[in-house]
Image (spheres, helix red, strand yellow):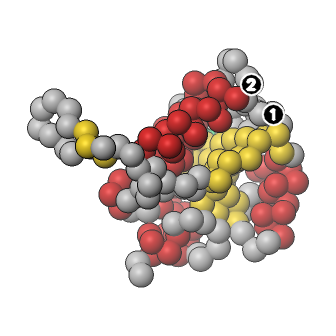
Amino acid sequence: MGLAEALYGRVYVLRLGHRPGRDKRVTTHVALVARAFGANGLILEGVCDEAVEGSLLKVLDRWGGRMHYECGVSGRSYVREWKRAGGEVVHLTMYGLPVDEVIGAIASSPKPKLVVVGAEKVERFYYEEADYNVAVGNQPHSEVAALAVFLDRLFKGRELYQHFEGAKLRIIPQPRGKKVVR
Ligand code: SAM
């Protein structure tokens, strides 16, 4: 079993500071990117949002795969518990160390990973508790982009070819047009 396979099933994303209504689209994209790029857990801190959960469940139903979902949890407690259980915490922030400098250490550690992404200002707690504060470039951009690039580096691009169990729909890649089988 390769490194990428060994890590599957052990990467959760903790989404901080979701504001229902306002962040509905971005947080849904965080969830869909998490699923499509090889993570298998999405934890929504502080609140629950039916719109996010509904979109994720719909995609899982049609396109397959399994994803652990929790909402309304305390982010601080979740991070502390994750570490107590032997996992490590990767906080994505433009103030962190360049992803290329730390991805080797993160990928070679067998510990389950909790990848933390913010919405607006992230509390100091997460910078201090994270095992790694990781920057995808030191410019401000988006949690969706940062998460996609980070997971792609972690899984070395192989997550794009993962099999999603139980899919009702599957795309047959075409040079032009759309071909979907049921
Ligand atoms: N101003 C906020 C702060 O100081 O934390 C950042 C807001 S940004 C729109 C939302 C999230 O995107 C951040 O919490 C971080 O997780 C992620 N992010 C944005 N740019 C990033 C970068 N260059 N590297 C890594 N993560 C980034």
Residue 43 in the image: state x and y as whole percent.
71, 47
Residue 57 in the image: state x and y as whole percent.
58, 40
Q: Residue at x 33, y 57 (%)?
A: 161
Q: Quadrant of residue 169?
A: top left
- 119 and 12: which is toward the camera: 12
Q: Residue at x 41, y 78 (%)?
A: 2
Q: Foreground mark, 1 or 2?
A: 1
Residue 30 in the image: state x and y as whole percent.
57, 38
Helix, strand or loop at disc 1? loop
Q: Say if 133 sits above or below 156 in the image.
A: above
Label 2 near label 1: C-beta < 8 Å?
yes
Helix, strand or loop at disc 2? loop
Q: Which residue position holds label 2?
A: 19
Q: Earlier in the sequence, mark 1 or mark 2?
A: 2
- 53 and 147: which is toward the camera: 53
Q: Say if 66 sits above or below 24 in the image.
A: below
Amino acid marked by disc 2: Arg
Q: Residue at x 44, y 62 (%)?
A: 155
Q: Is residue 10 left or right of residue 157?
A: right
Amino acid marked by disc 1: Val
